[in-house]
Image (cartoon, rainbow, N blue to C red):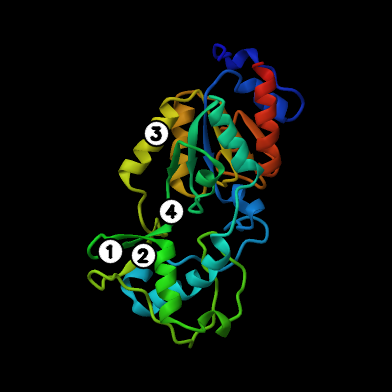
Amino acid sequence: MSLLAPLSSVVPPTGHTIEYAAEVIRGRPLCILTGAGISTDSGIPDYRGEGAPKNHPMTFNEFMGSEARRRRYWMGAHLGWMRFHHARPNEGHLAIADLEERGMATGVVTQNVDGLHHDAGSKRVVDLHGRLDRVRCMDCGQSYARSAIETQISQDNPGFIDAVDENLIRPDGDVEVPEGIDFVVPRCDLCKGVLKPEVVFFGEFVPGSVFRHAQALLAQSGALVVAGSSLVVNTGMRLVSQAKKRRLPIVVINRGPTRADQVATVRIEGGTSESLSALRQAVGDSIA
């Protein structure tokens, strides 16, 4: 890779473009932070973008404090999983994996729980909010593959899928379902404890060890690219603040405003799939 170009030597054209972004990050290993917007082209809607569901996700305290709320969660999550786990990486995920493969990115930090960066071939992935394809017992700590729990749910609730109408999937794999339907909630087969997907619910904190891994990726990087996140969640914004403190270039790609717009070196209004694909190509051309 070439030496880092001082930002003062880069003159922006009229408006912020992919080409300008490529010039700004030339020769700088990238840390890429992604949000729900990168997975919309894979059929998983954004919480806050255009067409996002209007209802609020279940909180950690709701889930842990009420058997009825857990039943409600697992009913919707079981329906949503039928579609959620069939989602496939799109061009944005593949572009990021290619940047890492070519030595242009140190890795990706994602706020998503869909596992699509792993499926795309990214090797260094920090799952800030966990993975929906794993389930853990909150009593004894036993961990399960989500597929095993889905099999248990199907066996304990024959005919459930046919008894309800599936609505729009949410970013956490949940689906709204009507009340009053009988449903057996999955339990730990070791201690009969409460099972919860290994994702950070609203009201939970990102584990310190996980955030330190994200910090480590940023520490090895010379620029930060934010793709598909409004940065409403503070964990992502903390990485942006650390990049700003280090005076790293910050490229923000998103449809709609973000909390980092005022500190972004480059702000591109657009979809992540096409923008990341174009950026990957432009960065490759710029260092050839």
- The quarter in which the N terminus is drawn is top right
Residue 78 seen from this side: yes
Relative side of 232 to 144, left or right: right
Q: Decide: marks 1, 2 in contact (CB < 8 A)?
A: yes
In the displayed structure, 62 sits above or below 203; it is below
Q: CA distance from mark 3 to mark 2?
A: 27 Å
Mark 2 or mark 4: whose residue is earlier in sequence: 4
Relative side of 211 to 264, left or right: left
Mark 3 or mark 4: whose residue is earlier in sequence: 4
Give the residue pinned by disc 2. 196
Q: CA distance from mark 4 to mark 1?
A: 16 Å
Relative side of 35 to 186, left or right: right
Q: Decide: marks 3, 1 in contact (CB < 8 A)?
A: no
Q: CA distance from mark 3 to mark 1?
A: 27 Å
Which residue type does callout 3 highlight? Gln
Mark 1 or mark 2: whose residue is earlier in sequence: 1
In the displayed structure, 124 sits above or below 140; it is above
Q: Residues within 10 Å of mark 3 (few under 14, many from 20)?
A: some
Name the front one of labels 3 and 4.
Answer: 4
Q: Which mark is residue 215?
A: 3
Q: To which quarter of the image does residue 104 belong?
A: top right
Q: Residue at x 51, y 53 (%)?
A: 114
Q: Which mark is residue 227?
A: none
Give the residue pinned by disc 1. 138
Rendering coords of residue 224 (x, y %): 53, 31
Give the residue pinned by disc 4. 131
Camera-nearest residue between 87 and 20: 87
